[in-house]
Structures are given as structure tokens and as C-alpha cells.
Image (tube, rainbow, N blue to C red):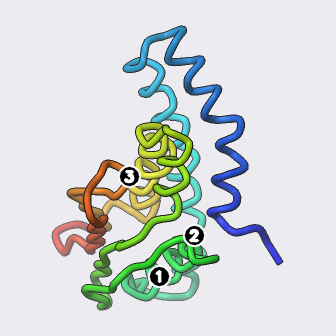
Amino acid sequence: MSISVIEQAKIQAQVLVPLVKALQAELGAPRANALVRKAVGDLYRGFGEEFWKAQSRGKSETDLGKAVSSAFRTYARDDALAYDIVEETHDAFAFDVKRCAYAEFYKALGEPELGFLLICTADFATAEGFGSDIKLTRTQTIMQGAPHCDFRYRRDAGEA
């Protein structure tokens, strides 16, 4: 059985947290964080592209609700997330995360801001990998102290 995403995140944090803190000390937080966002963004955008291509094989248009729901279950594995689905259609997938083990882990480390940088910012890059017609909006995260994360994926009918 493959290792869950939450376990991968915990293992990666052992290297990434000290590395990002060292970069912040050397370069200043704004510059270091921008570099990390770019590197993480490029990586997760590629993951999004690969996932979307796999979902789209042989289909004229991928069912957004089914595809994103499937991807999200991967991140929720091993009780990493508790969430409520708000909407699931061909052109939308919306859900609220009520409990997040990623946020709990980074809070326990005393590094929720690094958790947001390393975990939460990857969500938008992954969505970019799905294509220019797929938009993600999120106004709040547990990692930043909100009571829940509000993910809203939608296909933009104006673009193709």
C-alpha cells in the first residue's frame, strides 16, 4: 500500500521546515517565501496537469465534480480531512473542510504559517494544472485560523 499524502507531508516537513526557515533567515521571509511558492507551485501544477490528462483520456470533456472529488479523496486518506460536500456537478465541486490533520500537524510544530506556505498554496497551483477553464476560489483556511476551509472549484463557461 502506498504512503498517504498526510504521511508524506509529515516526512517532507522534517526537511522542508528547517530549509525554509534557513532561507528566510538568509534571504528574508518575503523573498524566501516567493521562491518556495514558485518551486511548490511548479511541482503541484505539474501534478495537476498529469492528473487531469489521466482523467480526460478518451473524453470530450472531463466531469469536474467526479474528477476533483476523486483527487480530493487522495488528500483526505487516513482520516487526514473531515469535509462536507456543498456541490458536486459536471462543472463544479465545492466542499468545506471541517477538520484538517495537515493544519493540526503544523500547529503542533508551532509553524502554521509554514504549513500554509507548503501545503495550502499548492491547492491553487494544482487547480491551474487542470486547465485554464477550471477556477478554484477559497476565502479562508483552518491553517490560518478559520473554522473551516471553503474550496470552490468551477468550470468557467467563458473559456475553453
Q: Is residue 122 above or below residue 96?
A: above
**Quadrant position of residue 54:** bottom right
- 18 displayed left or right of 33: right
- 52 displayed left or right of 124: right
Between 157 and 125, the one lying in front of the other is 125
Q: Residue at x 51, y 43 (%)?
A: 118
Q: Is residue 30 above or below residue 55?
A: above
Query: Tag 2: residue type?
Result: Phe
- Tell me if residue 53 can be seen: no
In space, the residues marked 1 and 2 are separated at their CA atoms by: 9 Å
Q: Which residue in the rendered view is the most extreme toward the right?
A: 1
- 3 displayed left or right of 66: right
Q: Is residue 20 above or below residue 89?
A: above
Circle 3 or circle 1, nearest the eye: 3
Between 119 and 104, the one lying in front of the other is 104
Q: Give the labeled residue for mark 3.
A: 143
Q: Are marks 1 and 2 in contact (CB under 8 Å)?
A: yes
Q: Give the labeled residue for mark 2.
A: 51
Label 1: element kind:
helix
Q: Is residue 105 above or below residue 130?
A: above
Number of other residues with Cα within 10 Å of mark 3, as a class: few under 14, some 14 to 19, many 20 or more:
many
Q: Residue at x 52, y 83 (%)?
A: 70
Percent across and percent down for residue 127 are 40, 61
- Which dot marks residue 154? none
Query: Tag 1: residue type?
Result: Ala
In space, the residues marked 3 and 2 are separated at their CA atoms by: 25 Å
Q: Give the labeled residue for mark 1.
A: 67
Image mark count: 3
Query: Tag 3: residue type?
Result: Met
Label 3 or label 1, whichever comes before in sequence order: 1
